[in-house]
Image: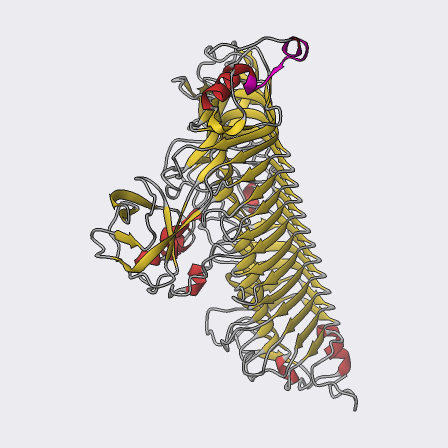
Amino acid sequence: MALTKTNLRMMDTGFITPLDFGAAGDGATDDGPELQLALNASDYSVIDLAGKTYATNQQLTLTRSNVTIRNGTIKYTGTSKSQFSILKIYGTDTSTTVLDVAASVSIGEYVVRVDDSSTIAVGDWVKIAHNTDATDYVSFFSNSSENMDYPNFKTVFFSDMQKITANDASTEDLTTLNPILGKLTTSSKVTELTSVLENINIINVTFQGHALRSIAIDNNGFSNASDQVVTVSSATHGLVVNDYVYFGNGNSDGDGFHFEDHVRGERTVSEIVDTTTFKYTNSGTTTTGTDGDANAVGLTGLNRALEINYCSDITISNCYFKDCPGGIVELNYVNNCNIDSNVYEGPAYPEADIFLLGNTTPYLTITNNRIHGGRGGNGVFCPSGHTARRGTTYNHTGGAYCLIKDNHFIGIRGCGIQLSSTFVRARIEGNHFSHAPRFLLENVSDTTSGNFNSLSIYLHTFDTEILNNHMENVMYTGILIGNTLTQNDVLTGDNSTSSLYSDTNNFIPFRSFKIHGNRVYSSRQRPGTQGISILGRVNSALKTMGSQITNNLVFGFKTGWEIATLSDTTDHNLMFTNNVTVSLPSTSTTNTYGFYSTGPGSIKRWLFNNNIFDVQGTAAAVDGAHNIYLWDTGCTNSTFNGNILSFENTAGSSFKNMNFGDVSLTGTVTLQVQKSIFVGNVFSGCADATKDLGTSISADNQPYNIGPSLSTTAADYAERYGLNVWSNINASGWPGPD
């Protein structure tokens, strides 16, 4: 259909509305064809929805650049309630031009030499893969069994997306608009992108889909596992083949309700038996069926508002997203996207991704959004290439220079923000996270695994700043950083001392992190395991160098802080100052810590000063607890000064305020503490002050407990251990040697 009218407004302003193509704009009439005509109208760059509501029974597509859509509502009224995007914006990647990189390129450079540049013109877009070997992971978890517990620690490829600004045919050199984000070798590939859409703006638009729907499952509604049959107690289930269903509130801990099956959304409807019965598959395999009970339900609905592929310079601003349980947007090969000041009103599908960062999303900004998950969904989520996520495998992740700031993630079931290992140089600042899962997985036997995805910030990378965020009702971990990048790979240089200054790669991205000014509060209903956890569990992993952890508050977790320095990983040059940690043990009588570092590994040059640690609870509950515990971790050239450590109630017999090393180990722990200073610390809560500070510092690995019982002169005491204040000082006087 052509334009139904041409008026003075259109000639003067250059914008059109769907009304110009015959749309009714009444929210009931199917205006999908008219909307699509407006999106296709290449003579007009602005599509003004004129404040109207347009119903559409079809998916809408936009395949041209320089378009602004504004001021109205698009309401999906079609039949699909599954994984479906109301508006899909996409360029194309059908080119067969794949070029070999002819010479190594370091991070931060702008020139890439290829084997033949003749097919690439100035202004073309290319994608760059560091290699094509699917077994050469950018990041990888070291332990195969643990890898199943943490599947998203594995990233297959790193990809970059670049616009070509110059082509020197004499040298076959291509010059890129932005710096190269990952170093290239002669195994790297440059692929021409057929078309990349540029300058797309979506402003003040409401998107509405099909709301999340609940299906009551009949009592004992799951039959034999070989058929995976479900009977519903509702009048009708209303499902179609390939719909996704999330089951909850079952009465068994079998695979039928297992958390790890649900988290990747792999339960899909395979057959409709009748209006009250359907069959499902679980990753294409047979699992053990389970019975339902009076509370068992299935949730379905994955309409998403937007899907954007092969685009650059995208703005989504001041929009409202309603009844889109699949989330706001999925991005794949999108450069320089700005998502600002939008509102999302759930409830979301339990494992939906409100912002799904798929393949290659550099220079991304997500700011000032208000997300109301309704006890469902992840906030910002970047999957890895470990496994398919709802049928799609995202192998080519990449997202340097990401900014996520001043967002509110309210009622999120899973992760607030999860970024893969390729999101180096990210800044996460001023966000508010409030967790409220719809299903607490009461019947999953492994409750720790069951709550694993209840994290506020979950990163697999370094050179990241996490600043001034507020996290509440956390059921697992507030901030988790997994240092999973391997040494001398696409994003890193040679980390060995001998090669540190001869490697031609940039020092950026730097192998460090900054965690400052965050407030992390555990759930009271399901107390979290760790407030903030930094893991280094990778073979040949990079050493963490030069990190800052300052001015944070961590409250209510079983362990306030965990830093894992395992095998090849170390944490050097760390500033840990001015933090306040209050640990609340669960009913368990072991493994409650304010700060816990586990080895085997080493730490050097730690400034661990002016912190407050308080373990609260009954004497029985904190037996075996430590305020600061460095287990099997060598500590050299460090200071532990001016800290206040307290057990709120007198603890049991096996605790310590500071404990360095596991003194029960023989022959494996040597010189746990060397050339370190302990000055001006205040200890309280220990009936026996010799338990205030315990360390394996002698050559034969015997414990050396430091406290008032130490028989030495005051001068020697002060010189070696400073003027610490021990637990059994009271108003009657100083009982110690000085």
Instruction: Tell me the residue at 63%/86% (across/down).
Output: 688
Q: Which residues are magenta?
A: 9-19
Tell which residue pokes out farthest to the bottom in this image: 732
Instruction: Tell me the residue at 70%/54% (across/down).
Output: 517
Q: Could you say where residue 422 lies in the image, as x and y percent from the top left?
A: 51, 39
Residue 373 vertical placement versus 107 (above, below): below
Instruction: Tell me the residue at 69%/51% (across/down).
Output: 468
Residue 239 horizontal side relative to residue 565, left or right? left
Residue 309 vertical placement versus 164 (above, below): below
Q: Could you say where residue 274 lies in the image, as x and y percent from the top left?
A: 25, 45
Residue 198 vertical placement versus 373 (above, below): above
Magenta-colored stretch includes residue 17:
yes
Residue 77 appears in the rendering: yes
Q: Choose between 577 and 501: the one closer to the eye.
A: 577
Q: Choose between 93 and 414: the one closer to the eye.
A: 414
Residue 169 vertical placement versus 271 (above, below): above
Magenta-colored stretch includes residue 386:
no
Residue 445: image quadrant is bottom left
Q: Choose between 521 and 171: the one closer to the eye.
A: 521
Main SS category, magenta section: helix
Instruction: Tell me the residue at 72%/61% (across/down).
Output: 578
Q: Could you say where residue 190 lies in the image, as x and y percent from the top left?
A: 45, 23
Residue 377 horizontal side relative to residue 604, left or right? left
Task: Point out the image quarter for the C terminus.
Answer: bottom right
Count every numbered label the image shows and give the total.
0
Q: Could you say where residue 652 lies in the image, as x and y percent from the top left?
A: 56, 84
